[in-house]
Image (spheres, grey):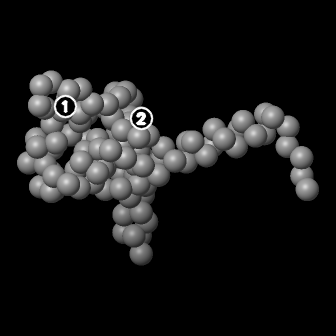
Amino acid sequence: MRWCNLDDLEKAAIYRLHAEFCKTLADANRLLIINELGKGELTVGELTARLGLNQSNVSKHLAVMRQHGMVKRRRDGSNSYYDLSDRRISEAIGLLKEIQAEQLQKRVSLAQLI
């Protein structure tokens, strides 16, 4: 049996948390929600109308995203408003889109050589 020191255990725990956070992003509808919330806070109804998704699905996605700290909720009377917990989430998604676009462009360039 391999013995780990506390630092190794802490690192492993941090990577597990990071993986869980990233898994939350691995859903196209959640990425759409992040894109919309990147523009400002919205209600479930507003997200539903903008994205063409049903209210139940949007609510479930928001619950998962809240659980992982990606979105926050603000109540105002009978309305709940959702927003990104940190604007850098939207920026990170934008950066990933840029990387993906560059990779796709390289593939297109290679395909044209064939």
Q: Position of residue 85 (x, y in %)?
A: 35, 29
Mark 1, secondary structure of its residue: strand
Question: Which residue position is annotated with label 2?
Answer: 69
Residue 56 image-quadrant placement: bottom left
Q: Is residue 51 left or right of residue 101?
A: left
**Type of the residue with mark 1:** Tyr
Residue 10 image-quadrant placement: top right
Question: Which residue position is annotated with label 1?
Answer: 81
Q: Is residue 1 visible?
A: yes
Dot 1 surroundings within 10 Å: few (below 14), some, or many (20 or more)?
some
Q: CA distance from mark 2 to mark 1?
A: 15 Å
Q: What residue lies at 36% left-to-right and 38% top-to-bottom?
A: 66
Dot 2 surroundings within 10 Å: few (below 14), some, or many (20 or more)?
few
**Type of the residue with mark 2:** Gly
Residue 14 image-quadrant placement: top right
Q: Position of residue 51 (x, y in %)?
A: 15, 51
